[in-house]
Image: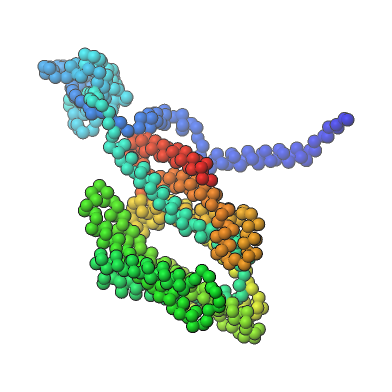
Amino acid sequence: MSVKNKKSSPWKSLQLGLAVMAVLIVYAYGFEITQIDLEELRSEQRQTSLQRVMRALARPDILEYDKEEQKAIAEIYVPCPASEVQPAIPGSNQPYITITPTCADPQSTVSVEGFIFLPNASGPVRFVPGDDPTNVVELGNDVAQTDSSGHFVLDVKLPKRTSEEVQFIRATLRRNVGLPHFTQTAKDTWDKIIETIFLALLATTLGTILAIPISFFAARNLMKGVRSPLAGISLSIIGWPVGIGVGYLIVNQIGKVSAPISSNLYVNLASVIVGSLFTWFGIRWAMPQEELRTPRIALRLIRLVVIIAVVLAGLYTLFQLAALTTNVSVVIKPVLGPLGFLATFLFQVSDVLRVTTPAAGAFVAGGALSSVLGRIGQRVAEKGSLTITKIFNLVVSAGAGATTLGLIGWLIESLYQVGRPEYTIWLPILTGAGIGLVLAVLTKAKDTLPIGLIIYYITRSVLNGLRSVEALVMAIVFVIAVGIGPFAGVMALGLHTIVSLAKLYSEQVESILPGPLEAVEATGANRLQTVIYAVIPQIVPPYISYTMYRWDINVRMSTIIGFVGGGGIGFLLQQNINLLNYRAASAQMLAIAVVVASMDYISSVLRERYV
């Protein structure tokens, strides 16, 4: 079989040539924009500076010796005076230097000879102006090195400095004494690298805890089947802000009630024990695992009252637990000694409980009220007639639209301080009510809407927006909020970890096998049971892998956010670079490299064992 060689088309050749020319133009313009200039790299000044920095980086400031030092100084005239110069007579049994000749023109070379110095010592030889002894001039890279008898000879080139007054050349020689020990730079680097590791650990832990539930809302396969009638969606939207506001007020009131008795350690302990037992048994009775028969309305109401009482008791117990940890930390701190940080940890935990309890209580109240109202709306849509359902949809959807846009307007007013509530508050409320009415008119009374996909797209958009903001920028904001230090770094890395892991986790949820999901749903399981029994068993190994990898990333990122005051070794690294202390900076870069390499090895071993 013969193969005929097809002639290339002139048009294709022209296209190829134009494509090559376009690529060359793009890269040529890139060279112009980025100002690539190798001539600057070859300049003598740049080469000298580069060699100096590279030599410093090659000698990290980790170990040092105690030094034994000797100095000697000799006179020199630049240029020679009119009268003859007599060399100074050195003292006996003291190190001294002689200069030959004792006067010379600028840029001339003179010989510096040292006597009776320490054997095998070395050090710089410097020019000291007589009119300004503090302005020492380096004589190039001239370093004297004595022999076994403490003698050295060194030729140096004089600087371009002339004066009628006498000037000096000074030799400073040092010798190591004893065994090497860690420098202060090494000790500071150790402290900061440990701070960096734990900064990354806390940020990863915080980010993982919050990213896991968010990832389920950002998974399309879990959310696409979630549908609800318009009445249920509207009442759920209204329930969130109302429940959060009411819940916040109630929780704060509980905190005020518990405050007067918070200073007594025994009262705290008794309150925590009794409150925990009451909460446990109350939940077990009000929410039994099995229901033998349908409970009567009176029993349901009693159970509802018990659940409310359990929630209030639980909140009170949390406030008492915060007070208990504070009192315990104060008592045990004096006796812990070097382990006093444990008492400080307890105190910080109590502070975290005081801050998060009102927020968590408000969020739980918002979710509970939203769920109750959503069920009421769904019941109305299922049981009510078409006319009643339509009227109900018109009212509640208008309220939901007004609530949503009203909150957005309030946020805009608080951020931009427009000062025109008729535009930032009332106009959005009226617009939202109008949109809600239009949606209720266009939607059939009994139709269900894909609320799951709406939540999915909102969650994805928020995650994408926050992930586009670098952790360095987040660190700047948190430094302003909480001050310079590792706490700002933890918050910045924690927020960036949340949005990054939530995306990775959600993509892993979207790739799970649909078989177990369908099997669990076929048994009549609700949404939470489906996630627990069908989703979580499939995602545990990749979740562990992603979390370990994120810890590795956070260790590296924490060195960067330290540049803006976010704590960790980055702050120390930036400080030494700004001070041109490249030997100290080299020690910090070496520590970062060792930690990152160790983290990579540890994470690979853990992934191999558990994933």
Scheme of colours in the image: rainbow
19 and 120: which is toward the camera: 120
From the viewer's perspective, tell me whether residue 31 is left or right of residue 596.
right
537 and 319: which is toward the camera: 537
Q: Can residue 408 be seen in this view?
A: no
**Measured from the top left, where is residue 554 in percent x and y?**
44, 47
**Measured from the top left, where is residue 321 in percent x and y?**
33, 64
533 and 590: which is toward the camera: 533
**Measured from the top left, where is residue 248 in percent x and y?**
40, 72
From the viewer's perspective, tell me whether residue 323 is left or right of residue 431.
left
Q: How many marks?
A: 0
**Measured from the top left, where is residue 225 in percent x and y?**
63, 65
Q: Residue at x 55, y 39 (%)?
A: 31
Q: Quadrant of residue 392?
A: bottom right
Looking at the picture, does residue 338 appear above or below residue 584? below
Q: Is residue 254 visible?
A: yes
479 and 281: which is toward the camera: 281
From the viewer's perspective, tell me whether residue 17 is left or right of residue 230.
right
Looking at the picture, does residue 392 appear above or below residue 522? below
Q: Quadrant of the N terminus?
A: top right
Q: Which residue is drawn at 29% across and 63% down?
A: 324
Q: Residue at x 27, y 68 (%)?
A: 267
Q: Which residue is drawn at 38% across and 38% down?
A: 591
Q: Residue most toward the left?
A: 92
Looking at the picture, does residue 177 appear above or below residue 218? above
Q: In which quarter of the image is residue 529?
A: bottom right
Q: Residue most toward the front?
A: 292
Q: Residue most toward the right?
A: 1
Looking at the picture, does residue 545 appear above or below residue 129? below
